[in-house]
Amino acid sequence: MEKVRRKNSRHYIDNMSIKNSFVFYALISLVIGIVIGVISITLVDDYRINLNYKYEDMTTRYDIPENGSFTAKYNKDQTEYTIYNASEKEVCNFVVDYQKERPVQEYIYPNHVSYIEVSPKFTKHDRIVDSALGVVNIVTIPIVLSISMILCVTIFVNRKLVRPIKLLTNAYRKVENNELDFTLPYPYKDEMGRLCLAFEKMKNCLYQNNQKMIRQFTEQRRLNAAFSQ
């Protein structure tokens, strides 16, 4: 039953007009292109998110005691942080090297800083990969849609135009050589099918006329032979 349905569906598609067939192939290609594009972007985003998570796991967090404070001494390439408790006693001291670590994130809650996080910078390799994947995300949809439309046009031309045109070209050559005993095996009812049918009818008319002329010529020769005796 399923095979019959598939056969009927394919038969219906093959019998569509050229215009409707192109619209059908274009829509299918568009849907497939969008699905592939979305899946590709999702996979790329997941990889980039996991890459960021890797560095988040390497983050160092410095908690500031309640009612505590901190000082920051800024230099060209680094900043020295000192954290104090509520009694203004030094709790810890650390240096952020901006050549190796990301800018400090200071999380501020009402009226005071709660903690400071320092994350390592991406390695050169990971930075290149992240940037490249960002570009991939931008160009994925246009490239995938372009490829899908090219495939759509290729499949459409091969299925709806190339075969009947090849049949008609071969048929024309046979008619040109006065070979009329053949058929055009194109069973579909689209515009090219109607063109093949019209050519088939023309060929049959030529064949019948030729047969009629041959019979008349044979009859004429028979009569001429009878009168000459």
Image (cartoon, helix red, strand yellow):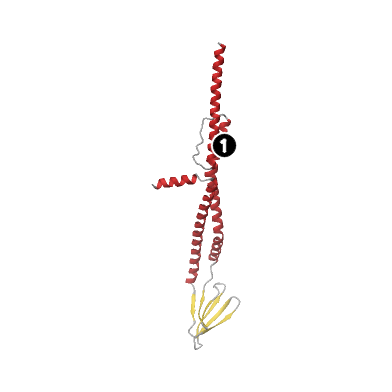
Task: Determine the residue positioned at 56% across, 59% down.
Answer: 139
Image quarter of residue 77: bottom right
Amino acid carrying mark 1 in the image: Thr
Q: Is residue 204 above or below residue 52?
A: above
Image quarter of residue 121: bottom right
Q: Residue 144 at what x, y percent from top left?
A: 54, 55
Q: Residue 211 at what x, y percent from top left?
A: 53, 25
* Image quarter in which the C terminus is found: top right
- Between residue 24 and residue 117, name the one nearer to us: 24
Q: Dot 1 surroundings within 10 Å: few (below 14), some, or many (20 or more)?
A: few
- Helix or strand or loop: what does disc 1 sit on? helix
Task: Determine the residue positioned at 49% across, 46% down.
Answer: 13
- List the residue tagged with mark 1: 169
Task: Determine the residue positioned at 53% across, 31% down.
Answer: 204
State how many labels appear.
1
- Between residue 37 and residue 3, name the one nearer to us: 3
Residue furthest right as drawn: 76
Task: Determine the residue positioned at 45% across, 47% down.
Answer: 9
- Between residue 228 and residue 115, name the one nearer to us: 228
Q: Is residue 108 above or below residue 28?
A: below
Q: Residue 143 at what x, y percent from top left?
A: 56, 56
Q: Is residue 113 above or below residue 57?
A: below
Residue furthest left as drawn: 1
Residue furthest top as drawn: 229
